Image (spheres, grey):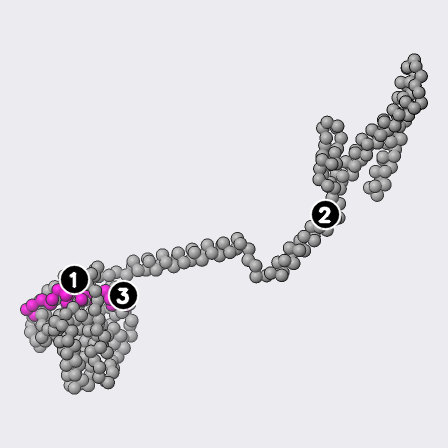
Amino acid sequence: MLIVLNSRFFASFIERRLETLVESFADQDSDRTTTVRPEHFLERAGAKCFTLMLSTARTVAASSSSRLHSPVAWNRKSEYYDLEAGEAERTPLLYTRESAREAYRRAKRRAEDPTKIHPVAVGLMVALLIFLLLGVVIGVYLLLLTIQRPWPVSHPFFLVERPAWWQYPVALEAATLDKQAVTDVIVVDTGAEGCFDQESCVRLLQNTEQRCWTASRDHIPYNFLIGGDGVTYEARGWKSQHGFEDLPGRNTTLVVGMIGNFTDRQPTAVQYAELKAFFTESIRRFSLSPHYRLHGFINTTHASNDGAALYGQLQRWPHWKGFV
């Protein structure tokens, strides 16, 4: 339909322009004194017709190209639309078909490789993972800061576990603590002679265990014992209840015995250092609350000032809450 309309418009326009051209030639020739030769007239008429047809064709092409969305450039010098200055003419139907074809190819590629992940999505996931790990590290660091240690400990913690000093077939049988982190620690002196090397301390523990088993078919009542050699010896350990019937809080208390009689003399400096290291290690193992309470016990059957030298020093320590 568009081609037909353009052809009719073109034919009528050419016809009107030819009539005007012929009339202008006739007027020019009538004004001249000399007679114009027929071949010259035909030559000029042909040139004019060619120029007229070329300009008319460009005008019609420009009008139809604008409707077909074809890029047409305006030439300012010749004052007409120049098809060659723009891009190649596109047919709307063919252009739409090419776009649909390209979209189909993209969809087919995505369907063939469903596991392919967009690089932007990968970057976002990596950033999220980094932020998550950073949050975990900061949370653990803040949690460690909230754990209150009684004091900085420079003395290392030395532990001799029960199997290392008790090699008999009788296994430890004691009630288990209900709470993982106990809240009270009772420090007592053993009232016996001290030991200042591992061999003598191990012998003392073995003799004490043997006497308790022979007397009452029970194990050594302490949870831990600290010798004059600056070593902690495991008796019942962190998970079992102590065996003293006259001491309170069996299910919430650890009993630590300082090996020796400290009514008139102080424990050795290394014994005090090991006791501090024991508190810190117990907190690190989550077997002792950071807000624990430190107590003492006076055995009136020995003397009224039992452990006076020991408790005179412990009363200056943090967490001291008095005697039980």
**Label 3 with label 2: CB-CB less than 8 Å:** no
Residue at x-position 74% and y-position 41%: 89
> Does residue 4 lie above or below 301 as drawn?
above
Q: Quadrant of the N terminus?
A: top right
Would you say 304 lies left or right of 321 here? left
Q: Quadrant of the C terminus?
A: bottom left
Query: What is the magenta segment's predominant secondary structure?
Result: helix
Looking at this rendering, what residue extends furthest in the top direction?
33
Range of magenta residues: 263-285
How many residues crowd mark 2 within 10 Å: few (<14), some (14–19), many (20+)? few
Q: Earlier in the sequence, mark 2 or mark 1?
A: 2
Residue at x-position 60% and y-position 60%: 113
Amino acid marked by disc 3: Arg
Q: CA distance from mark 3 to mark 1?
A: 19 Å
Helix, strand or loop for disc 3: helix
The image position of residue 188, as x and y in percent, is 14, 72
Residue at x-position 51% and y-position 56%: 122
How many residues crowd mark 1 within 10 Å: few (<14), some (14–19), many (20+)? some
Q: CA distance from mark 2 to mark 1?
A: 89 Å
The mark found on residue 284 in the picture is 3
The mark found on residue 317 in the picture is 1
The image position of residue 177, as x and y in percent, is 27, 75
Would you say 76 lies left or right of 11 here? left
Amino acid marked by disc 1: Trp
Q: Nearer the viewer, residue 170 or 158?
A: 158
Q: Nearer the viewer, residue 284 or 98?
A: 98
Judging by the rendered image, the residue that carries numbered circle 2 is 95
> Does residue 142 lie above or below 256 as drawn?
above
Q: Earlier in the sequence, mark 3 or mark 2?
A: 2
> Does residue 61 lie above or below 279 as drawn?
above
Is 207 magenta? The answer is no
Q: CA distance from mark 3 to mark 2?
A: 74 Å
